[in-house]
Amino acid sequence: MHSEEKVVVFVLTVEFAGFLFFVGATYCICKDGIADTQLQKALDYACGAGADCTQIVQSGPCYQPNTVKDHCSYAVNSYFQKKGQAVGSCDFSGTAVTSATLPQSK
């Protein structure tokens, strides 16, 4: 490559149902089979520790589906992304896990 050649990097982003998708991205989602009370604790922690939870309030565009698990996944993923996907920032006392894909809402 010549010194005058420039490398151009394109990042494809798409917003769908309140989640920002990045090609080859890693997400943080709440696990299946966890009690709603535990998921609510993870959600509350994430929202209180820097996650942007304005999208999942009742009048927000990502309020539906209105389940604790869906709101939990939104909140923990927001927290995880704001922390730069740092190791350990997607655990939430064992209620969340990293994933290459977002969960399908039911």
Image (cartoon, helix red, strand yellow):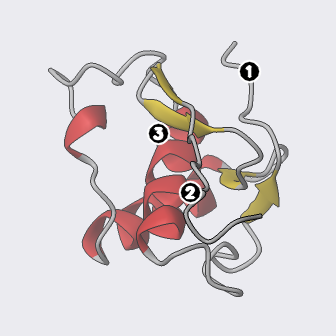
Which of marks 3 and 2 precedes in the sequence?
2
Which of marks 1 and 3 precedes in the sequence?
3
According to the picture, the residue beneath numbered tag 3 turns out to be 71
Mark 2 is on which residue type?
Lys
Q: What element carries label 3?
A: helix
Eye-nearest disc, 3 or 1: 1
According to the picture, the residue beneath numbered tag 1 turns out to be 104
Q: Is mark 2 on a helix, strand or loop?
A: loop
Eye-nearest disc, 2 or 3: 2
Mark 1 is on which residue type?
Gln
Residue 69 placed where, x, y %?
60, 39
* Residue at (61, 72) in percent of width and height: 3
Residue 91 placed where, x, y %?
70, 76
Considering only vertical position in the picture, is 73 above or below 76? Answer: above
* Residue at (70, 39) in percent of width and height: 23
Residue 102 placed where, x, y %?
71, 35
Q: In which quarter of the image is residue 94?
A: bottom right
Q: Distance between the residues labelled 3 and 1?
A: 13 Å
Query: Could you say which is closer to the camera, residue 63 or residue 81?
Result: 81
Give the quadrant of the N terminus: bottom right
Asked whether the residues under the numbered discs 2 and 3 touch, taking CB atoms below 8 Å apart as contact, a structural biologist would say no
Eye-nearest disc, 1 or 2: 2
> What is the crowding at mark 2: few (fewer than 14 residues within 10 Å), some, or many (at least 20)?
few
* Residue at (61, 73) in percent of width and height: 85
> What is the crowding at mark 1: few (fewer than 14 residues within 10 Å), some, or many (at least 20)?
few
Residue 30 placed where, x, y %?
69, 51
Q: Please give left or right for residue 31 compared with residue 73 in the image.
A: right
Query: Could you say which is closer to the camera, residue 47 or residue 26?
Result: 26
According to the picture, the residue beneath numbered tag 2 turns out to be 6
Considering only vertical position in the picture, is 44 above or below 90? Answer: above
Residue found at the far left of this picture: 59
